[in-house]
């Protein structure tokens, strides 16, 4: 059953009503804050508001820079229904486009990734260079006055930050990602040098929940000792040791050191960048609205969450690993190591899926109590503050 097609008690809640509830929680001190209002997960008006004011405006992560190293390498993605693509240019920069032909808007590149010399539309074979210019349009010389120069792919702004590719549908993005994340980088994540981590996995999954339910789940670790018995709970980070980050309009984070200074979750002896407790510390952060990262000294796991309906999202996730960790894996062991890594993350995803879909189903209820937030769920309040601020 696909829950995104069923209406419920909150479906017709007005935008004003949802924003008012968000504002009430955002304006309280954290200690008094309440969870994301249930109607924010279900209101049709609020969902449309998110498409216009969040996904049509904000920077969103769609992958890693090292996934497209060579000229003509490309990744495709969707931003809340808008197909987009990024392509490595011959000058080594990347260019972003709406993935739709300039003739009658057929989706130009159907594959998720690949390499191309030119892009040829499957419909009438209009053919574009890697920079989006129209090179050839069959039989269009039959149309008086037609000029190739008048048509091209719609270009989009892109930015690389710490190895992640960001793209935006906004024509005039207000701020560069690097400047929005400056203090996060300077104070917390810059020391990991995650831009040098090498991407080894990229996968996509579809879950039946509102996109914000996965943001909620990923940004709090209160559930980890209970839900992640087969995976993250083994790192043994006591709940009392989690430290929540400062308030910020663009991101939230928390971090926790693990007990062990060696083995999984700890820095490799050849890692000389991380010092002291950071050599065994995990940082979970979210770049608002939808880029989630678990950053460890020995790997990172990221997720980009995109709504495909009120009650359904697609999450593209990947894993990247520092070179000193990869250097220890022999060529003959690599495939086994990689499938073990993918299986570990997929197990963690399975552990979360029931919770995330449960958040969506439970919040559809007619009668709900007020709810509350645990002290290490501060990131949820920061996410509420972001949603409130973007709605005002
Ligand atoms: S729609 Fe692409 S060539 Fe016609
Ligand atoms: Fe989780």
Image (cartoon, grey):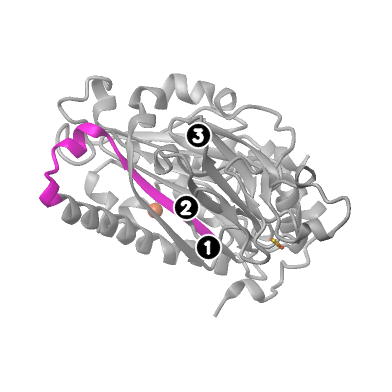
Image quarter (top left, top right, bottom left or bottom right) of the C terminus = top right
Q: Which residue is drawn at 50% across and 60% down?
A: 111
Mark 2 and 1 residues: CB-CB less than 8 Å, in contact?
yes
Residue 321 covered by magenta stretch: yes
Q: Which of marks 3 and 1 is nearer the N terminus?
A: 3
Between 162 and 128, the one lying in front of the other is: 128
What's the CA distance linking mark 2 and mark 1? 9 Å
**Other-residue count near label 3 (Cα within 10 Å), few / some / many at <14 / 14–19 / ≥20:** few
Q: Which residue is drawn at 73% across and 50% down?
A: 21
**Other-residue count near label 1 (Cα within 10 Å), few / some / many at <14 / 14–19 / ≥20:** many
Q: Label 2: which residue?
A: 217
Which image quarter: residue 235? top left
Q: Residue at x 73, y 68 (%)?
A: 11
Q: Label 3: which residue?
A: 90
Where disc 2 sits, the SS reads helix
The magenta stretch is 314-333
Image quarter (top left, top right, bottom left or bottom right) of the N terminus = bottom right
Residue 86's place in the image compared with 351, above or below, is above
Q: Which residue is drawn at 30% across and 61% down?
A: 347
Q: Label 1: which residue?
A: 359
Residue 353's place in the image compared with 181, above or below, is below
Where disc 1 sits, the SS reads helix
Which image quarter: residue 204? bottom left
Q: Visible in this render: residue 287?
A: no
């Amino acid at each position: 059953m696909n829950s995104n097609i069923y209406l419920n008690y909150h479906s017709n809640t007005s935008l004003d009503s949802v924003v008012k509830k968000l504002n009430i929680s955002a304006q309280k001190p954290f200690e008094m804050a309440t969870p994301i209002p249930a109607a924010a997960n279900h209101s049709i008006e609020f969902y449309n508001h998110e498409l216009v004011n969040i996904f049509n405006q904000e920077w969103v992560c769609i992958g890693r820079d090292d996934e497209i190293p060579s000229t003509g390498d490309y990744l495709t993605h969707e931003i809340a229904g808008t197909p987009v693509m990024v392509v490595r240019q011959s000058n080594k920069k990347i260019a972003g486009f709406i993935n739709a032909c300039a003739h009658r808007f057929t989706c130009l590149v159907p594959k998720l990734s690949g390499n191309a010399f030119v892009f040829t539309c499957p419909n009438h074979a209009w053919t574009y260079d890697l920079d989006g210019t129209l090179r050839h349009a069959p039989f269009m010389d039959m149309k008086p006055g037609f000029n190739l120069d008048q048509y091209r792919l719609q270009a989009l702004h892109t930015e690389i930050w710490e190895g992640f590719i960001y793209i935006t549908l906004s024509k005039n993005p207000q701020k560069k990602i690097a400047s929005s994340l400056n203090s996060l980088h300077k104070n917390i994540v810059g020391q990991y040098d995650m831009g040098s981590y090498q991407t080894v996995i990229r996968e996509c999954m579809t879950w039946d929940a509102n996109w914000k339910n996965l943001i909620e789940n990923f940004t709090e670790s209160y559930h980890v000792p209970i839900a992640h018995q087969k995976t993250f709970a083994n790192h043994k980070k006591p709940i009392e040791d989690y430290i929540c980050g400062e308030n910020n309009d663009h991101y939230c984070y928390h971090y926790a050191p693990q007990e062990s200074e060696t083995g999984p979750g700890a820095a490799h002896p050849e890692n000389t960048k991380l010092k002291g407790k950071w050599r065994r510390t995990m940082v979970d952060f979210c770049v608002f609205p939808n880029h989630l990262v678990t950053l460890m000294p020995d790997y990172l796991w990221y997720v980009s969450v995109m709504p495909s309906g009120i009650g359904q999202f697609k999450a593209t996730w990947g894993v990247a690993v520092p070179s000193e960790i990869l250097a220890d894996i022999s060529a003959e062991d690599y495939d086994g190591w990689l499938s073990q890594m993918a299986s570990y993350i997929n197990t963690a995803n399975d552990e979360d899926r029931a919770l995330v879909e449960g958040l969506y189903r439970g919040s559809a209820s007619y009668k709900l109590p007020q709810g509350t937030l645990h002290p290490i769920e501060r990131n949820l309040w920061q996410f509420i503050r972001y949603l409130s601020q973007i709605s005002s």
